[in-house]
Image (tube, rainbow, N blue to C red):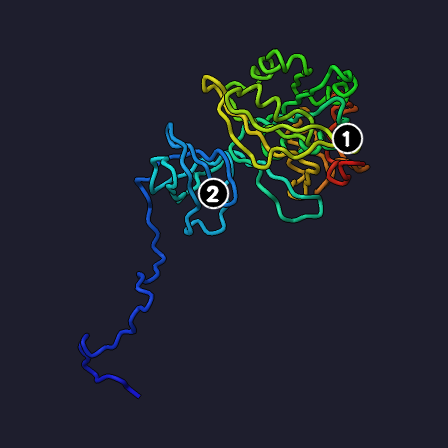
Amino acid sequence: MRRYGKHTDEDDVRVRPNRRGNRPRTSIRPKHEDAAEGFVVTVDRGRLTVLVEDRTITAMKARELGRKGVVVGDRVAVVGDLSGAKDTLARIVRVEERSSVLRRTADDDDPFERVVVANADQLAIVTALADPEPRPRLIDRCLVAAFDAGLSPLLVLTKSDLAPAESLLESYGPLGVPYVVTNREELADGAAADRVRERLTDKMTVFVGHSGVGKTTLVNALVPDRKRATGRVNTVTGRGRHTTTSALALPLPDGDGWVIDTPGVRSFGLHHVDPARVIHAFPDLEPGTEGCPRACSHDEPDCALDQWVADGHADPARLYSLRRLLATRERREGD
């Protein structure tokens, strides 16, 4: 039945009132062309600390971003109160395109990947030579994650006063990974920090390692004015306590780089890693894969890399290292 006549006037049309008093929804989103540029330095329970010019502000993610995550290292657009005054809150309305993304999963069976940090250039894998004992499988997994994310790896070995570094370095020699060896005396007098800092210039470097290896102690030596809490290794279990609870980006003195301290990890799942991408970190082996069968795992009888190495195009130790890294995805860290 027709409610109104054929020629209706606007006054004849009944409009249901908006009881909530808010504006009707629209799919048109503001462009926020006047938003300020910011850099996310830490994330804590939904609140993000953002560096805007020379001010540190507190912000939250805008609803319009939906489920898009914001992590340490992100370059963002921020609106609202940017004064940095106490009890003020800004909004992150846009996340700029990322140049790199370091991811991990809880384990190899977990399909849900977690973004550790964005826009980093280098991954520093911090490992103690003793107290606690080194875990080569965890190092291998971190290397795979670095290669997959396009980050340059750096191996930092601590506590060389308790155990020699030669045997561990020998196994990673064919990979050509740069390294720095430190001891506790050098950390105390600043010599270790100076040598590590040379590797960090003009880079954003993520520090990763399991608890108790001296990761945060090293970060404190690199950035003396921002002391973070450190812990001790349990003498019974040989494991350290988690004293760092959230990732934090810190500028190096003189502004010549950034270091990102992360919580200690006990596992580094690689469910998200496509093994085909790891070969890109081996430019001397990659051309040899042209003769491989489709979906080759590079560790099977028909793999063309065996002939490539046999013809003298690459060192056999490099092929062994590649296959060892690819195999880490099938093994647990403690194996």
The residue nearer to you, when weighing 68 against 273, is 68
Specify whether 3 is left or right of 301. left
Q: Is residue 95 visible?
A: yes
Which amino acid type is marked by label 2? Arg
Q: Residue furthest bottom?
A: 1
Specify whether 212 is left or right of 197. right
Specify whether 162 is left or right of 114. right
| Quadrant assignment, res 13 | bottom left
How far across and how far down the image is residue 108, in percent?
A: 71, 44
Residue appearing at x 33%, y 46% in the figure: 31
The residue nearer to you, when weighing 261 against 144, is 261
Which amino acid type is marked by label 1? Gly
> The C terminus lies in which quarter of the figure?
top right
Residue appearing at x 34%, y 55% in the figure: 28
N-terminal of the two: label 1 or label 2? 2
How far across and how far down the image is residue 84, in percent?
A: 37, 35
Rate crowding at label 1 as few (under 14), some (14 to 19) or many (20 or more) other CA atoms within 10 Å: some
Q: Which mark is residue 238?
A: 1
| Quadrant assignment, res 330 | top right
The residue nearer to you, when weighing 67 against 184, is 184
In contact (CB < 8 Å): disc 1 and disc 2: no
Q: Which mark is residue 47?
A: 2
Q: What is the secondary structure assignment of the residue under circle 1?
A: loop
Rate crowding at label 2 as few (under 14), some (14 to 19) or many (20 or more) other CA atoms within 10 Å: some
